[in-house]
Image (cartoon, grey):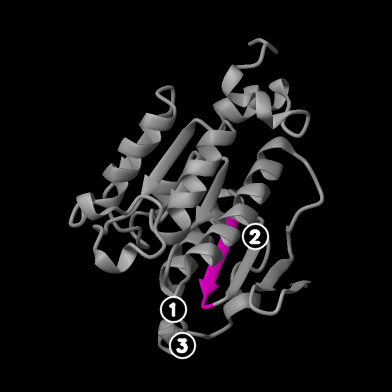
Amino acid sequence: MTNERDKRYDRNGKSVTPADNEILAVKKVCVIGCGGLGGYIAEMLLRVGVLNLTLIDNDVFDETNLNRQLFSTEGNLGKPKVFEAERRLMSVDSKAKLRPLHTRLDAANAGELLGGHDAVVDALDNIESRRIAAEACGKLGIPYVHGAIGGWSAQVSVIMPGGEGLAPLYGNLTDKDVDKSWGNLPFVAGFTACMQCAEVVKLLLGKSPNLQGSVARADLMYYDFNVF
């Protein structure tokens, strides 16, 4: 271990120090979903110095992804998102230690897929999968960084082991109760991913304050920001 700084991290300045980067380099983070949120999350975490990333997604890119998903291009439509994410991320940092899993996270495999990570990041698009992931993280003792978007609105929370999980946020809601007509906008996805990444880095480095046990909600249309 050394405190000499890799030139690529020079612009982290004093906000993320060389010693911090040594910590980030050995931490393991799982990003569930490589779409609107997950693409931004994975790339920002890698660029700040998180080298060990597990990427989980069973989907392929299609034209509807082009409006907001960082790794989606006209040239990779129909290709698995996790492998396109791997290709992009390795072009950013060849030292990255990536584990792309082209599979769907479910109740049967969640424990196996999520175990061994220092943090799990929710870049999912449905409540059912979120509940499965959050419950598994609670059992495994892993912090779960939740994020969700809809229209101009963003939501981020950090759920720690031993807490109430997603119940305070979603109660008995199902995906049928969600109005998807508002769509998903690229800048809202990017904004939400930024907040999630900030929380992940703080968790990994033991920094505070953070959103443990709280939820941040933002409306980018009216610039209404609240933390509950």
Which callout, 1 or 2, points to the residue nearer the camera? 1
Residue 147 is inside the magenta segment:
yes
- Please state the horizontal and vertical placement of residue 149, each as a whole percent of the image: 53, 71
Which callout, 1 or 3, points to the residue nearer the camera? 1
Q: Regarding mark 1 in the picture, which secondary structure is present there? A: loop
Q: Amino acid at mark 2?
A: Ile
Q: Mark 2 — residue?
A: 159
Q: Going by the image, does 14 lie left or right of 217?
A: right
The front one of 195 and 116 is 195
- Sort mark 2 into few (<14), some (14-19) or many (20+) by Cα contacts within 10 Å: many
Q: Going by the image, does 64 lie left or right of 36?
A: left
Query: Is the residue 224 above or below the residue 209 in the image?
Result: below
Q: Going by the image, does 152 lie left or right of 222?
A: left
The tag on residue 183 is 1
Q: Amino acid at mark 1?
A: Gly
The tag on residue 68 is none
Query: Residue 214's image quarter?
Result: bottom right
The front one of 24 and 37 is 37
The tag on residue 179 is 3
Residue found 18% across the figure and 57% down from its top? 78
Q: Amino acid at mark 3?
A: Asp
Part of the protein shown in magenta: 145-151
Task: Identify the mark nearer the N-term, 1 or 2.
Answer: 2
Tell me the CA gap for discs 1 and 3.
9 Å
- Sort mark 1 into few (<14), some (14-19) or many (20+) by Cα contacts within 10 Å: few
Q: Going by the image, does 140 lie left or right of 169?
A: left
- Please state the horizontal and vertical placement of residue 70, each as a whole percent of the image: 41, 52
The front one of 122 and 193 is 193
